[in-house]
Image (spheres, rainbow, N blue to C red):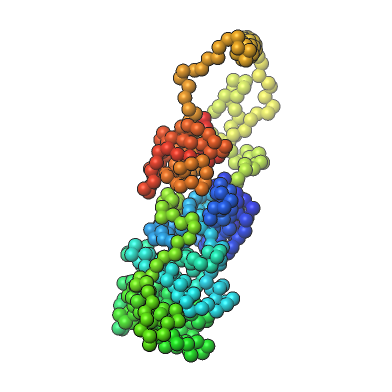
Amino acid sequence: MSELRLVNSRLDKRYEITERLGRGSYAEIFLATDTIAAPNSPHRQVVIKVLNVFLQNDVDDDLERTLVENFQNEAIALDRVRHPNIISRLGHGTARDLDGRMFHYLVLEYMSGGDLHKVCRERTLELSEAIGYLEQVSAGLRHAHAKGVIHRDIKPQNLLLSGDLKVVKIADFGVARVHATDAPITRVGTNIYAPPEHSPFFAGKEGNRPASSLTPAADVYSLAKTFYTLATGEAPRFYANEPITDLPMQVRSESWAEELKRVLRRATDDDLALRHQSVDELWADLEEVRRLALGVETETRVRPKLHTIPQPQIALGYSPNAPTKPDFDTTRDLRKRMPLMPERRAPIAVADQPRIDEPIANGNGGPLNLPNGRFSVDLDAPPAVDTPSTKRRARSLRKAVLIGVVLLIFGGGLYGTSVYLQGLGLIPSFQNPLSSDPVGITNTDVNLREGPSANTPIIGLVTRGSEVRVLKRENNWYQVEIVKQGRERQGELAAGKGWMNGRFVDVK
């Protein structure tokens, strides 16, 4: 096992990595500060998710390629299901750690409130509060399913909260089914929340659909067991791979207990045909529980206004526009060590020199000594003797250098005199009519903004290697006009003129 050395380093000239938050089998999670974001920006702190193929010692070329492809698919899934209640991808890249090991990474938004699993361990949620969180998660899942993405690992640990604990977002699409052709017959998810169809042993079970027809009902199952935890404060450990048939003792006397048990029993049925087929069905079936959570007596027939479909909750900083799609390399490059600084190397032994098939003339006009075809120099040979032609070349070179120095001094004197006289107003200043705005090349992908601040709206994207013309400067911000994009842009924002941070353009 080999963890990447990234703490106290700066990634992509902007992300200062402050601490390691955790790691999985082939990924590490870091907390970082975006140094170009405004201090009050909701994305001042970000999460860096790193693919680390060095964490295990058994990675072959095929597995490495699969890991990179899965990592890229996670980014694609996040972009496809971009939603206020789903973690947003803010960027991506490829870099090296302090030991020179290459890796791919995703930049994700940071949710400082922790996860719902942590909250449920610390206190018992009110039912109305639990339903509020359920509604937001349901809204996000509903959107994901509409985009053809099935999460496959819904659980409290993957539901992250904002700092004020009011907004919850779905995280970790690492095992999501993005394409209909993806093979689902793989055990994924946490055992006590995962539906039975995630197991290969479920395929062909009598009375059920084959596992190859994975549907949104799989996420409905996990969502129902997650809501069990939110509503009762206990994880459904006694119902791992089994339908929920009862609630913990401490909530059985609640007015909503029997109705909630009925809904959860149906949502976690082994038979997919009997289960809720969509998030909307589950949400509608919970209507009576939701009404009871508001404390309204059903005998009064006063029906509060309830949402017929789950509604999202939008937090500050959300944008529906996804960044450039990643295209990670799947070759062996990730396994190569490429030091950040060149190392001092010892002289190569004669035996390690390349083989030379033809004799090469030495300084004396004779061939080099090539014993056995290996390169070696005859250190005992007498030094070369200057010939008349050699002496003439040396004199000509000295004369040329002397003339160049004289011209340089003379030209410098003329320039200094002209500047002095222009300063006194004795001669007019001249401007080159062919001069134009400076041109630069971007050194990374960078957002094009409406004004000279990271708080202004994003209106376009300048890709790495793009040629831009600098029209105006304000502090460390440049107003630029795109002359030529480094590569084809993706997305709807395609402005050709705007503001960008000057550190990301190398002016010629």
| Towards the viewer: 383 or 27 | 27
| Towards the viewer: 91 or 85 | 85
Q: Where 176 falls versus 292 (above or below)?
A: above
Residue 265 in sight here: no
Residue 501 in sight here: yes
Q: Quadrant of residue 205?
A: bottom left
Q: Where 25 falls versus 126 (above or below)?
A: above
The reply, left or right, for residue 189 in relation to residue 31 is: left
| Towards the viewer: 381 or 495 | 495
Q: Residue at x 41, y 52 (%)?
A: 321
Q: How many marks?
A: 0
Q: Where 379 falls versus 419 (above or below)?
A: below
The x and y percentages for residue 119 are 56, 73
Q: Residue at x 37, y 64 (%)?
A: 143
The x and y percentages for residue 40 are 57, 52
| Towards the viewer: 411 or 100 | 411
The x and y percentages for residue 432 are 49, 17
Q: Residue at x 42, y 88 (%)?
A: 258
Q: Residue at x 53, y 34 (%)?
A: 473
The x and y percentages for residue 433 are 46, 18
Quarter of the image with the N terminus is bottom right
